[in-house]
Image (cartoon, helix red, strand yellow):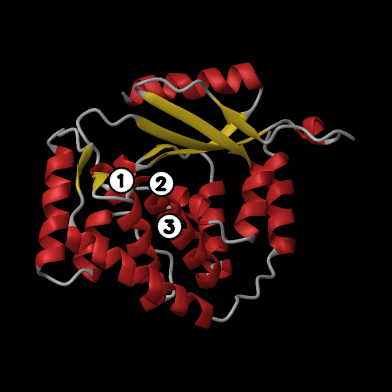
């Protein structure tokens, strides 16, 4: 599969006339709870030749390939990524710490990691994860019958927000690490382990009766974390000069 992904990335470089600087896995495979038929969520950062940026017109800063049953591939232009890094964007921060890397031939990713460490905003990231969890909960976990698989996509951002509240750092990608660190041993812990085992075994995990203890946990955490997020002081981020310098240096490598 890595060869297929590598070929896909090379084709993007040729068709779009870009240089891919970094590519990684995002989603359930990177989080550690893929099912047997999980697709590959490939995310990448790229840069155009210098002349592409010298224009009076706004140009697309995202490349998206058609999604199929096996591959979901998309990427961000470096300038967009740097603008999002300035805002401590959690999606970008997760890409940079993905445990599955497909391409890192250039030092840009490590430079971004270093800058991300200096500009991390606990408050912004907590609100991001809470918003993600609430949106998924509202769409899929209402009523007596719920889409069981969606528990993962509510629990992971909740635990990520809990991690930030406790440590004021970017949470790890590993869902298991979050569970082991943050969920006390007991009924809730057992339910999560069972759900992970079922997902990895390839069970459908579609509509089923809601799991009361999981629902109760979600409700309590929403209330507590919302209050905690309000109490965190905003982070003053001043890395504009470093971001400009990094962008210009990378352009010169084309």
The one nearer the camera, 112 or 87, is: 87
Q: Residue 119, percent across and down?
A: 58, 67
Q: Is residue 220 left or right of residue 181?
A: right
Q: Which mark is residue 134?
A: 3
Q: Residue 155, percent across and down?
A: 30, 57
Task: Write the residue at 64% across / 60% down.
Answer: 86
SS class, disc 1:
helix
Residue sticking out furthest to the front: 143
- What residue did someone put label 2 on? 139
Q: Which mark is residue 150?
A: 1
Q: Earlier in the sequence, mark 1 or mark 2?
A: 2
Q: Mark 3 near mark 1, Cβ–Cβ under 8 Å? A: no
Kindly report the distance in space between the C-alpha atoms of the residues bearing marks 2 and 3. Answer: 9 Å
Q: Is residue 191 left or right of residue 86?
A: left
Q: Is residue 98 left or right of residue 43?
A: left
Vertical order, 1 against 129 (above or below): above
Q: Mark 1 near mark 2, Cβ–Cβ under 8 Å? A: yes
Q: Earlier in the sequence, mark 2 or mark 3?
A: 3
Disc 2: CA contacts within 10 A as few (<14), some (14-19) or many (>=20): few
Task: Write the residue at 24% across / 50% down.
Answer: 144
Quadrant location of the N terminus in the rendered image:
top left
Residue 33 is drawn in which quadrant? top left
Q: Earlier in the sequence, mark 3 or mark 1?
A: 3
Q: Is residue 186 left or right of residue 36?
A: left
Disc 3: CA contacts within 10 A as few (<14), some (14-19) or many (>=20): some
Kindly report the distance in space between the C-alpha atoms of the residues bearing marks 1 and 2. Answer: 9 Å
Count of marks placed on residues: 3
* Of marks 2 and 3, the one in the foreground: 2
SS class, disc 3:
helix
Task: Write the residue at 27% across / 55% down.
Answer: 175
Q: Residue 207, percent across and down?
A: 23, 38
């Amino acid at each position: 599969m890595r060869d297929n992904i590598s070929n896909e990335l090379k084709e993007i470089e040729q068709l779009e006339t870009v240089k891919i600087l970094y590519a990684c896995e995002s989603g359930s495979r990177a989080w550690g709870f893929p099912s047997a038929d999980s697709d590959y969520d490939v995310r990448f950062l790229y840069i155009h030749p210098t002349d592409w940026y010298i224009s009076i017109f706004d140009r697309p800063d995202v490349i998206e390939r058609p999604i199929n049953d096996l591959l979901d591939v998309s990427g961000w232009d470096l300038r967009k990524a740097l603008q999002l890094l300035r805002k401590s964007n959690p999606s970008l921060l997760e890409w940079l710490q993905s445990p599955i890397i497909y391409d890192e031939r250039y030092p840009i990713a490590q430079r971004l990691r270093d800058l991300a460490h200096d500009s991390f905003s606990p408050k912004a990231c907590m609100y991001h994860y809470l918003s993600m969890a609430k949106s998924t909960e509202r769409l899929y976990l209402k009523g007596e019958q719920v889409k069981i698989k969606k528990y993962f996509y509510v629990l992971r951002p909740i635990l990520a927000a809990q991690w930030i509240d406790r440590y004021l750092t970017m949470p790890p990608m590993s869902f298991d690490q979050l569970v082991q660190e943050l969920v006390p041993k007991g009924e809730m812990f057992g339910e999560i382990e069972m759900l992970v085992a079922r997902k990895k075994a390839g069970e459908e995990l579609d509509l089923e009766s809601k799991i009361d203890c999981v629902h109760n946990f979600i409700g309590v955490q929403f209330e507590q974390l919302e209050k905690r997020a309000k109490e965190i002081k905003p982070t003053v981020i001043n890395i504009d000069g470093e971001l400009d310098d990094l962008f210009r240096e990378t352009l010169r490598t084309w």
